[in-house]
Image (cartoon, rainbow, N blue to C red):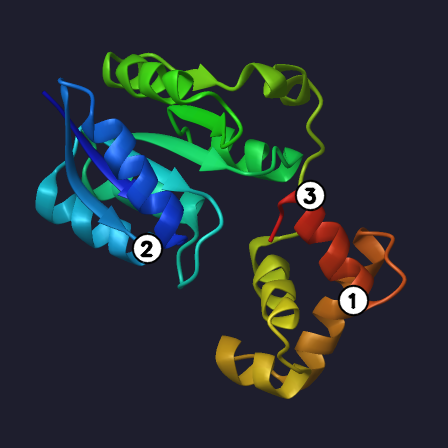
Amino acid sequence: MIRVLLAEDQAVIRHALAALLGLEADFEIVGAVESGDAAVAAAAVHRPDVAVLDIDMPGTLDGLSAAAEIRARVPSCRTLMLTAYGKPGHLKRALTAQVDGFLLKTAPPEDLVSAIREVTAGGRVLDPSLALTAWDLADNPLTPREADVLRLVAGGAEAPDIAQRLHLTAGTVRNYLTAIVAKLNARNRTDAVRIATEAGWI
């Protein structure tokens, strides 16, 4: 029996996936949660064989961050990422995080079932439509701290608030923002957020 944990923030999709996968005789759905944080907690409790994680979820951990945390806490659990968009930056992060599978939500249901069985058996799965993208991934030019700053900007935070949350001075935050705009060849902060988001870097 393959023990499967699902993490998807949209309730309709989460319940549909649980119902679909629950039809497989060799699958047992041990949890269906709505965030990356909940996925890590559920993995620690249920010790699934595979965690199927949406990339874009609310909370402090997105799907890729949750996958890395699950790998650290439950090394026996394999991770399979689901996403609506094949952003090069997301794929790059997924490969760096050594996830076991990366599938688009547009894939046929039977592909998801096959992917779960494949990663459980120790294999790796990459959505065929992303195979060429994997060869030509631009590296993220942002440092982890710059990504943190830009992520907060994307959430609507201003420099003083960012400084307080990251324990920096407002001047340091402004310096980071200047460097970010320059690195991304952006027109301004808003444009930098757009570029980094589309690339999957934040």
Numbered disc 2: secondary structure: loop
Between the C-alphas of marks 1 and 3, the distance is: 14 Å
Q: Nearer the viewer, residue 170 or 199?
A: 199
The quarter of the picture where residue 120 lies is top left
Write the residue at 81% across / 61% down.
191
Instruction: Identify the residue under disc 1.
Output: 190
Instruction: Choose the circle earlier in sequence order: 2 or 1.
Output: 2
The location of residue 176, given as percent across then percent down, is: 71, 68
Instruction: Identify the residue under disc 3.
Output: 199
Write the residue at 32% across / 31% down.
79
Q: Are marks 1 and 3 in contact (CB under 8 Å)?
A: no
Between the C-alphas of marks 2 and 1, the distance is: 28 Å
Q: Is residue 73 above or below residue 41?
A: above
Between the C-alphas of marks 2 and 3, the distance is: 24 Å
Does residue 120 appear left or right of residue 97 in this picture? Answer: left
The amino acid marked with disc number 1 is: Thr
What label sits on residue 34 in the rendered view? Answer: 2
Write the residue at 28% across / 30% down.
20
Of badges 2 and 1, the one in the foreground is 2
What label sits on residue 102 in the rendered view? Answer: none
Instruction: Choose the circle earlier in sequence order: 2 or 3.
Output: 2
The amino acid marked with disc number 3 is: Ala
Write the residue at 70% across / 51% down.
196
Q: Is residue 106 above or below residue 162?
A: above
Of badges 2 and 3, the one in the foreground is 2
The location of residue 174, given as percent across then percent down, is: 74, 77
Does residue 53 appear left or right of residue 84 in this picture? Answer: left
Badge 2 crowding class, 10 Å Cα cut-off, few under 14, some 14 to 19, many 20 or more, is some
